[in-house]
Image (spheres, grey):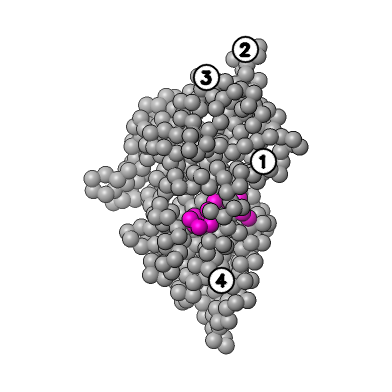
């Protein structure tokens, strides 16, 4: 659910790692020792360093079970893992995210971890997080890092406007957010083209945020029918945030249309230049803001607005799973339990600028400091919910073929809410039905 940087070399290295010798690691028991392969998708230097350091700590303190670190890439990970699963060459321990587990669990490629994990870990991670990786009462991954969406705001512009500064305890409502956006928008020559906007919505990839933020207005978009099958509905609660974004871009002009084609990174230069007062961004973007902001630029992190569903929003945490073909499932689960101990989750979260799922880890002073917005993230962690798309077979096809172009056209003002509802729900349910026959 976050923006990642890829390199051709990293992708090639992952492909070679998955094809060459992964299955052989299961049989490496020379001298009574077992060697497990751990495919990590950490990509930032701090995160890679933290993962490698924890692997070294494990190897230094465990004589009979050793772990080999394999560097992977998020680029095309689903297809690359599928190839390795079908070829019987998957790593023992797999780093992925919850949105990827549905197909792999249904395909029988992942081990059920329910009876392999310690009770201390099960209790430390909230049920809402476990629900992102549990299907039919079986657990296919340990959710350990999560990423909410937040508002990164220009503190100077907020203070100049005199608006109330929201907190997790007293957030803005969506109506207040619209009013604040208007107050922060300035069209000095009254030509209908503001020199500065209250907010910039980066919608190059519009689907996940459009779906996940619907929870804040008590929508879900993906529901269960009376027979327990997945179905798409797009009623008022489901569409409220999308309609607000459409209003801001096409009616109120408090958000620029140019932002719709941007990624989060693309909006940062305009933010630093004062062209946009607020940016709805994934939590990890704070690192780019901290690194790239001009000297003296004052910024803050605010919770997203609240609606009938409160501050709720959907997330798909990063996960650690065990391959069904691994000959050493308990040993692999033991390493995952080690990697996700609270103090280790703190290391991994700080390396990736994300939030841990561990309740104990979230209380660490380094994650509750106001600096760089860590406290805002910790304060809203309890409001995070499983993304409505998790466990929905056919979601990927719906997203690519139906939802992405439909949302992009709608936000650009090509058609109204009725046409969007028809495309998302009517056309989308035909796709879901095909997966549920």
Disc nearest the viewer among 1 and 4: 1
Q: Residues within 10 Å of mark 2 (few under 14, many from 20)?
A: few
**Viewer-closest of 9 and 195:** 195
Q: Label 2, on which residue?
A: 191
In space, the residues marked 2 and 4 are separated at their CA atoms by 61 Å
- Can residue 44 be seen? yes
Task: Report helix, strand or loop for mark 2.
Answer: loop
Q: Does 352 appear in magenta?
A: yes
Q: Which residue is mark 3?
A: 252
User: Rounded to the nearest whole Å, what is the CA distance between mark 2 and mark 1?
Assistant: 31 Å
Q: Which residue is mark 4?
A: 37
Q: Residue at x 53, y 61 (%)?
A: 342
The residue under the point 57% across, 88% down is 31
Q: Is residue 305 left or right of residue 259?
A: left
Of the image marks 1 and 4, the number of the one nearer the N terminus = 4
Residue 10: x percent and y percent?
65, 58
Rendering coords of residue 209 (x, y %) = 49, 39
Point out the frontmost of discs 3 and 1. Answer: 1
Q: Residues within 10 Å of mark 1 (few under 14, many from 20)?
A: some
| Span shown in magenta | 350-362
Q: Nearer the viewer, residue 287 or 220?
A: 287
Q: Earlier in the sequence, mark 3 or mark 1?
A: 3
């Amino acid at each position: 659910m976050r923006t990642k940087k890829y390199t051709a070399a990293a992708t090639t290295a992952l492909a070679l790692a998955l094809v060459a010798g992964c299955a052989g690691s299961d049989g490496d028991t020379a001298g009574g020792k077992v060697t497990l392969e751990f495919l990590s998708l950490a990509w930032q230097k701090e995160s890679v360093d933290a993962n490698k350091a924890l692997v070294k700590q494990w190897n230094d303190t465990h004589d009979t079970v050793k772990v080999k670190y394999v560097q992977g890439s998020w680029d095309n990970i689903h297809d690359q893992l599928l190839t390795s699963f079908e070829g019987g060459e998957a790593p023992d321990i797999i780093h992925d995210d919850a949105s990827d587990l549905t197909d792999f669990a249904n395909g029988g490629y992942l081990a059920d971890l329910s009876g392999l994990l310690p009770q201390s870990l099960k209790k430390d991670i909230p049920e809402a997080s476990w629900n992102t990786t549990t299907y039919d009462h079986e657990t296919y991954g340990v959710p350990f890092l999560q990423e909410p969406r937040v508002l990164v705001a220009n503190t100077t512009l907020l203070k100049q406007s005199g608006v109330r500064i929201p907190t997790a305890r007293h957030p803005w409502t969506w109506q207040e957010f619209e009013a604040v956006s208007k107050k922060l928008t300035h069209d000095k020559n009254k030509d209908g083209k503001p020199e500065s906007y209250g907010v910039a919505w980066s919608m190059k990839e519009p689907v996940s945020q459009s779906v996940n933020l619907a929870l804040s207005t008590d929508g879900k978009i993906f529901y269960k029918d009376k027979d327990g099958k997945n179905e798409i509905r797009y009623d008022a609660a489901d569409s409220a945030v999308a309609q607000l974004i459409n209003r801001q871009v096409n009616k109120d002009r408090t958000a620029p249309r140019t932002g719709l084609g941007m990624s989060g990174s693309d909006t940062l230069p305009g933010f630093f230049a004062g062209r946009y007062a607020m940016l709805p961004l994934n939590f990890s973007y704070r690192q780019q803001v901290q690194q790239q902001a001009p000297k003296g630029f004052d910024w803050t992190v605010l919770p997203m607005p609240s609606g009938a569903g409160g501050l709720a929003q959907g997330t798909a945490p990063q996960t650690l799973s065990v391959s069904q073909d691994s000959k050493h499932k308990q040993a692999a689960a033991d390493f995952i339990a080690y990697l996700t101990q609270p103090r280790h989750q703190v290391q991994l979260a700080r390396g990736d600028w994300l939030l841990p799922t561990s309740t104990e880890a979230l209380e660490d002073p380094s994650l509750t400091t106001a600096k760089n917005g860590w406290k805002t993230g910790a304060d809203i962690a309890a409001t995070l919910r499983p993304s409505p798309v998790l466990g929905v077979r056919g979601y990927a096809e719906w997203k690519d073929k139906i939802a992405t172009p439909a949302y992009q056209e709608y936000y650009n003002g090509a058609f109204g809410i009725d046409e969007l509802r028809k495309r998302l729900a009517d056309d989308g349910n035909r796709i879901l039905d095909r997966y549920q026959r």
